Amino acid sequence: MMPTIPATNGHDAWSNPGTSRAINVTMTRAEVEAFCTKHKTIISAIEALPRGGTRVVMMNGDEAAIMRKAFGKTLIEGKVEREHWATVRR
């Protein structure tokens, strides 16, 4: 018999599992870091985008929802081009 996994994946006490934690914005990395500090949210990962802007991943979905609202018009909608962080050589 398979165990039952709750819809929230066990994180319902601290996270909104329906919201993606990743956000793409037109701001620079330094601007994003300062903005997140101002809003008292924690960054899980951050990277510059090759065509300008920054991809930031928040620690949880609730903080991502707060920051999406705060970033406002700087949000980049849709898919973005990202750099590959590793090259495999054979």
Image (cartoon, helix red, strand yellow):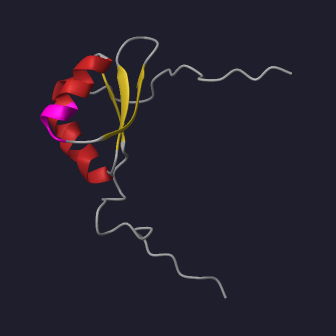
Q: Nearer the viewer, residue 88 or 77?
A: 88
42 shown above or below 13: above
| Residue range of the region highlighted in magenta in the rendering | 36-40
Q: Residue at x 65, y 23 (%)?
A: 86
Q: Nearer the viewer, residue 20 or 34?
A: 34
Q: Position of residue 35 (x, y in %)?
A: 18, 28
Q: Residue at x 18, y 25 (%)?
A: 73
52 shown above or below 11: above
- Residue at the extreme bottom of the image, as rendered: 1
Location of the C terminus by quadrant is top right
Quarter of the rendering containing residue 39 = top left
Q: Is residue 22 left or right of residue 25?
A: right
Q: Position of residue 85 (x, y in %)?
A: 59, 23
Quarter of the rendering containing residue 67 = top left
Instruction: Examine the residues drawn in magenta and state their main secondary structure.
Output: helix
Quarter of the rendering containing residue 34 = top left
Q: Residue at x 25, y 25 (%)?
A: 32
**Residue 48 appears in the figure:** yes
| Residue 62 falls inside the magenta stretch | no
**Residue 27 appears in the figure:** no
